[in-house]
Image: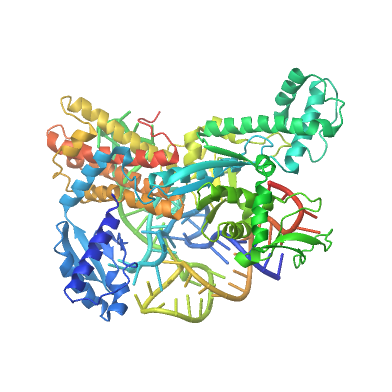
Amino acid sequence: MSNLFRIFQGVVIEALGQLQAQGKLAPGLDLDKVAVEPPRDPSHGDLATNAALVLSKGAGMKPRDLALALADALKAHGAVVAVEVAGPGFLNLRLGDGFWRDQLREVLKAGTAWGDSDLGQGQTINVEYVSANPTGPMHVGHGRGAVVGDALAALLEKAGFQVTREYYINDAGAQVEALARSLHYRYREALGETLGPMPEGLYPGDYLMAPAQALATSEGARWQKAPEADWLPHLRDRAVEAMMGLIKEDLAALGVVHAVFTSERKLVAEGAVDRALADLESRGLIYTGVLEPPKGKTPEDWEPRPQTLFRATQFGDDVDRPLKKSDGSWTYFATDIAYHKDKFERGFATMIDVWGADHGGYVKRLQAAVKAISAGVGELDVKLCQMVNLLKDGEPYKMSKRAGTFVTLRDVIDEVGKDVVRFIMLTRKNDAHLDFDLVKVREQSRDNPVFYVQYAHARACSVMRHAALMFPKADLSRQALAQAPLDGLADADELALIKALAGWPRQIEAAALAHEPHRIAYALQEIAAQFHGLWNKGRDAAHLRFLLPDDPALSMARLALVQGVALVVASGLSVFGVVPVEEMR
RNA sequence: GCGCUCGUAGCUCAGCCGGAUAGAGCGGCGGUUUCCUAAACCGUAGGUCGUGGGUUCGAAUCCCGCCGAGCGCACCA
């Protein structure tokens, strides 16, 4: 465990135990609320604990008295150089410079594994993301879900969870039948027929032309005049296969690879839906009833009729939800229940789904279903991704299929590169709108976070390269730097940067627990800002420069810090699936 | 009408399962600058955290009402 805040939480709890053993503190207190965190204001110290505040009531002591007693106990710890009671009863701890320098050694020893955590204890988590309908290439919005899901999966892995990346193929509904008809249409064109514009409700994009041509070549005209019922299943399979091929190419271009692809059609064919619903049925959670129309917005063709309903209201949903369509087939919800039951039975008590925000109204019912099919054990977290506003130099870059300015995910990746796409997609909370400016993301300026963070890494690498020239005989490997004397690192900003690097494991754990990969982007920007700030100090004050030709020893100490920065930036970028650059072009 | 997501500085947004004087970038204002290759740097002004209650030692954070924005609302996914 490298999260020193968790380590010191243990230290505090141990100290409290000592007080209890000495009869200075009441026994049997609930210590769960005792937290150790960084103080808002660094001048307050390095660590702060609320122990006295949260325990005072149960202990029957004034917070300040408890704090003073705890302070005495904590002073015994070797790394602690000062303990102060502050405010209403906070305890601020200050750790010695030597402790922090040792933390930097730990960073160097760990390399990009710095921040890896045992928090998850190998617990399995299923992250389902993208799951775009196989009806065409991915657009930019899908790309956001892809990046968020992928980074979240990597983040959880770094935090010690065992993650399965999964894609659910919606290959069973009316949409893929429309896709099959669209393919048939293109197929007839490929065979030489001249048809008008694609009928309403079909997929008019030209991405079906190649699969249609392939179909015409390999299977000839046998489906050209045949009745729909004869060719539809076959063409549907061909079309889905082709579209999944497209999607996988797009994902590959983005560096996203799923471990498991689950087919809705296959799930239905194997009877998973029947089994899941039989299970619910046996527990009395399914009934036939008539739903009220939504108040204030009654659909025009509303007709009260009995439906097969799941008792979602028993699990926190607002109304009971239909499982069968009027034609007798399953609703999407019914198959989704089966799918999540399947995931649960495959060993995933914790499931995360990444969806577009327009599916927000669907969250409650599926969470209700997960509770129902897992006897309350399973947990579903849904991350909703808001829209991506594509801009070009501040102007809206409107996407319109008709005007031919439809921008696919692939277009954007080809234009700015996968690493830029990935990073930018993670610079906002998933549920906030995201502006993606094709021009600004390539600017080399302070307000372009991709550049700013990459530049920190490149600058650090640049300093290392210079060091190799300046001190040709020195061993600059991170292992060697970890052994170097670091006493020279004494400037306040240097120590502050070390503390930021030392706090990295906590950032990883907090982001992982919250299922919020975007926090890593902000953490990286802060570390980059501190590093650039330190570099800039060297411009005016020559004695603060990293490389001092006349002082190899101090240079080595500072190179340890520079190398530490590069490693932490690389550690964070690896979570994002972004390659750290060694120099800016 | 109901539900979901949200409402923080002029703009774009952070704010870590409640914590100590609310942060960053851009923009504004005032300076500095060609420097370890580095496309700048330093300083400064600016906020009733939509609003009204409540819980708490303590609320931007949790609960309720209201206002406003986006999304969704049987049988599409």
- Toward the viewer: A23 or A416? A23
Q: Residue at x 30, y 36 (%)?
A: A460
Q: Residue at x 76, y 65 (%)?
A: A291
Compared across the picture, whether A188 is left or right of A93 comes to right
Q: Is residue A584 visible?
A: yes
User: Residue A553, located in which quarter of the rendered image?
Assistant: top left
User: Residue A140, located in which quarter of the rendered image?
Assistant: top right
Q: Residue at x 16, y 56 (%)?
A: A79
Tell me: residue B75, above or below residue A576: below
- Toward the viewer: A396 or A554? A554
Query: Percent position (x, y) of residue A104?
Result: 23, 44
- State the residue lying farthest toward the front: A282
Tell me: residue A69, above or below residue A164: below
User: Residue A76, located in which quarter of the rendered image?
Assistant: bottom left
Query: Percent position (x, y) of residue A4?
Result: 27, 54
The number of callouts visible is 0
Query: Percent position (x, y) of residue B25?
Result: 41, 49
Q: Is residue A316 visible?
A: no
In the rendered image, the quadrant that contains the C terminus of chain A is top left
Q: How is the image coloured?
A: rainbow
Query: Percent position (x, y) of residue A497?
Result: 27, 48
Compared across the picture, whether A558 is left or right of A260 comes to left
